[in-house]
Image (tube, grey):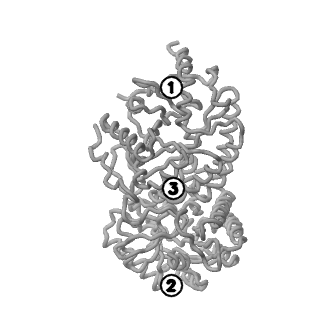
Amino acid sequence: MQKEDPGLYDYWPYKDRPKLEWPNGARVALWVAPNIEFYELDPPTNPKRTPWPRPTPAILPYAQRDYGNRAGHWRMMEVMDRCGVRGSVSLNVALCEHHPELIAECAKRGWEFYSHGIYNTRYCYDMDEGQERAIIEDAIATVKKHTGQMIAGWLAPALTHTERTMDLLAEYGLLYTCDLFCDDQPQPVNVKDGRFISIPYSLEMNDIIVYNFNFQAPRRYADMLKANFDQLYEEGAESGTVMCIPLHAYAVGQPHRIQPFAEALEYITGHDDVWVTTGREIAQWYLEHHYDTATADIAKYQGA
Amino acid sequence: MALPDDYLKYPRRGYGMDHDRYEWSILQKRPAVTWPNGARIALWVVPALEFFPLNQPAQPFKAPGGMVTPYPDLRHYTLRDYGNRVGVFRVFKLLDKLGIKASVAVNSKIAQRYPLLIDEINARGWEVIANGVDMGKLHYGGLAEADEKALVQESLSVLRETSGQTITGWLSPAKSQSDNTLDLVAAEGIEYVCDWINDDMPYAMKTRHGTIHSMPHAFEIDDQTIMGQNHHSEQQFVDQICDQFDVLYRETETQGGRIMALTIHPWMSGQPHRIKFLDAALTHIMGHDGVWPATGAEILAVFKGQS
């Protein structure tokens, strides 16, 4: 039966929360999350979602995405290098097999890898528990094999979920989800067992949402990024905030878009008191220093 | 109900692409290309001359820019035909003024209906790229191979006959292909296709009739994409063209020659309130040293000579 509330978190107003303190007194924890994706040209059908808007072979949207791996990624990575930003990669893990050179370049830079499913054309809708366990185990094993890292985070493939996803992620020892967009600070997630948190992964700042859904221009995107940062930086003086910039090289890595993005990232990382970090580091810090106080504070608002 | 077991099987999961048409390759790791006279940028301007039939079928979908209202949609029919009557002459005049050579993508129906436009192209020594039959006749998965072969042959025979040109470039209407399109156009002497938007440079594609090349025909900065689909202003169009050019130009300092491709729809950019913005964008580009305006066939010939 469908529920009216996912039950994954409790209401927790953004006022009078315990002060969130980042390392070295930083106001904002900035993490940049490139989605490194592989879309299949001829994916299997799914009862809930059609992968491509055109009949197979949908070469136009397929090639548009392939551009990211062939060309755009390398431009985006150069800007991040210049700004001293390590990526936290939202990874379709099959990309480790398809394009190992790309993974090796990210690994060499100390980037984090977390899971965005196997392919972006395989959806979780209607998976039974065994199937969902299989893709989580596949993601853990594949990233481990190719990078040596144990994945800490999860962004559901193509943002497709089941009701049991978070429980399973916690059970397998992951630390955080990127799929809850209801806050500008980390928050505990209600799971069956263990401690598991949500880290802000902003859809509003996501280049694909800005470009391919909201049809904004590149210089406007740069203005939005700066405004988002300015506000979170201001509020971060009182209690730490998180700014996430989710990217797709096939969008932001286009020649007509990279320069405004570079200017925005230079602006943001040019500030003092910004913790330029990764999803894993945010999660570890929060779990160690803030999880318990947050849980206690949230409890005050429940059952009133 | 659970998904079938084979939903978690990945038959093409392995090194490279998940198909056999081209090799996985990283743009920035390829050998540098050198353009004639030490040019840094090959400027490839591609106006499109399109015929949108009033009875355009949604087979299997309507090409972007096509009919919208119930039949007879005089509104969109005439807005598109405006490009072939009026807009095209503004665009050609602008290109003449700036000394820019073009490759013109032409539906074969245009050559039959408005042969004067073919004369205009030939008088300038420009290239004709075959753009299928018309914007209602798409190539797509599910189209019988014999029917698609007939479309390819109709387009090429009409355009070759009316223009007298060899015609080695192909653009599928709406950049839509079937699994057979590359094989069918290669069989008819096509050497490059403009449908794949995954690169900034040419690359080799495999067909049943030998190797052909993909050319980086512009899509993201196409006037229809920016001003039509994205509803950006004319000035935002100029900004994006200039930003694109500046980045590619800068990259040539370390990565060899690049291609700046620009797609122009005369029904869009040829409007009175837009033409001066196109002028501003092209003037910015032509104001740089080392810009080589060339046709697709010329650019590809130089590229192939070095690969």
Judge the density around disc 3: few (<14), some (14-19), many (≥20) Cα neighbours within 10 Å.
Answer: many
Judge the density around disc 2: few (<14), some (14-19), many (≥20) Cα neighbours within 10 Å.
Answer: some
> In x, y percent, where is residue B289?
71, 73
Q: Is residue A163 visible?
A: no
In the rendering, which numbered label is found on residue B268? none
Q: Are marks 3 and 1 on the same chain?
A: yes
Task: Identify the secondary structure beneath mark 2.
Answer: helix
Q: Which residue is mark 3?
A: A68
Q: Which residue is mark 1?
A: A188
Q: Which residue is mark 2?
A: B163
Q: Label 1 to label 2, Cα distance in Å?
A: 69 Å
Q: Tag 3, which chain?
A: A
Q: Which of A6/B135 is in front?
A: A6
Q: Amino acid at mark 2?
A: Ser
User: Which one is closest to the eye, mark 2 or mark 3?
Assistant: 3
Residue furthest to the top in view is A304
Q: Tag 2, which chain?
A: B
Q: Amino acid at mark 1?
A: Pro
Q: Residue at x 44, y 71 (%)?
A: B204
User: Which one is closest to the eye, mark 1 or mark 2?
Assistant: 1
Q: Are marks 1 and 2 on the same chain?
A: no
Q: Which quadrant of the rendered structure holds the N terminus of chain B?
A: top left
Task: Identify the secondary structure beneath mark 1.
Answer: strand
Rendered view: A257 above or below B98? above
Residue A140 relative to residue A230: left or right: left
Query: Quadrant location of residue A150?
Result: top left
Q: Amino acid at mark 3?
A: Gly
